[in-house]
Image (cartoon, helix red, strand yellow):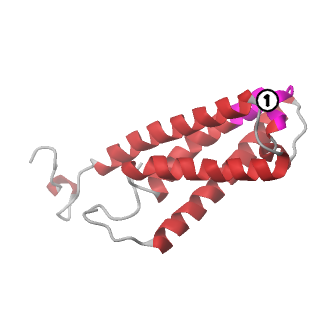
Amino acid sequence: FVPLGRKFYGRQDFNPTLIITQMVAMQAAFFASLGIASSAALMCIGGHVELGRIFRSAEYSGEDWIALCLATVVTAVVMVAVLVLVVERAKKCLDFVVTYHFFHFLTTWACGGLPLQGAWWACNVSAIVLATVVGEWCCIKAEQQEIPLGRRKEEAVDLQQV
C-alpha cells in the first residue's frame, strides 16, 4: 500500500478540518464495508438480510452470529487498506480504529440497547486489535519506502542505507 499524501511528515500543525474529514471517511468506509460484508455473509448461509442487523447486538446471540462475526473480521481487513490510504500514519491508527468502533458502539446502543452479548464484544474487540496491528504494520511499511529525489526510480535515495 502506498499512501496518497505527503512523504515528509515533520512537525504537523493541528488541523481539525483534516481530522474530521478523515474520521468521516473512515466511518463511512466502516459502515459501508460492514453492511456489504454482513449482507454477503448472511446471504451465503441463507440468513435474513437486513441492514439494521449490524446495529443490534442481540443478533450476535442468534443462529447467524458466526456470519456477523465473520463480517466484522472481514471489515477489519478492509479497514486496514482504508487506514493506509486515509490516515497514512502508524501512530494514528489506534486512535482512528477505536474512534470508528466507538461510534459503532454508540449506534448499536442507540438502535438496540447496550450490547451485552459476549459474542458482540469478542468480535468487535478482535476487529479492533486486528485492524490496529495490521494497519500500523502496513503504515510503517509505507512510511519506510524510498523517497524518490530524482526523475528516475533508479536515482531514488534509500534512507535506510544512509
- Residue 98 percent location from the top left of the image: 55, 47
In the image, is residue 68 part of the stretch drawn in magenta?
yes
- Residue 118 percent location from the top left of the image: 72, 28
In the image, is residue 69 part of the stretch drawn in magenta?
yes
- Residue 39 percent location from the top left of the image: 79, 42
Q: Is residue 148 above or below residue 71?
A: below
Question: SS of the residue at dot 1?
Answer: helix
Residue 79 lies left or right of residue 151; in this view the side is: right
Name which quarter of the figure residue 155 lies in: bottom left
Q: Residues within 10 Å of mark 1 (few under 14, many from 20)?
A: some
Who's the residue at 51% across and 45% down the image?
A: 80
Name which quarter of the figure residue 5 lies in: bottom left
Q: Nearer the viewer, residue 20 or 148?
A: 20
Residue 64 in sight here: no
Q: How many numbered discs sit on the rendered protein?
A: 1
Q: Is residue 29 above or below residue 140?
A: below
Q: Is residue 62 above or below residue 16?
A: above
Residue 114 lies left or right of residue 16; in this view the side is: right
**Tag 1 residue:** 65
**Span of residues in magenta:** 58-71
Residue 136 lies left or right of residue 105; in this view the side is: left
- Residue 30 percent location from the top left of the image: 64, 51
Who's the residue at 45% across and 37% down the image?
A: 133
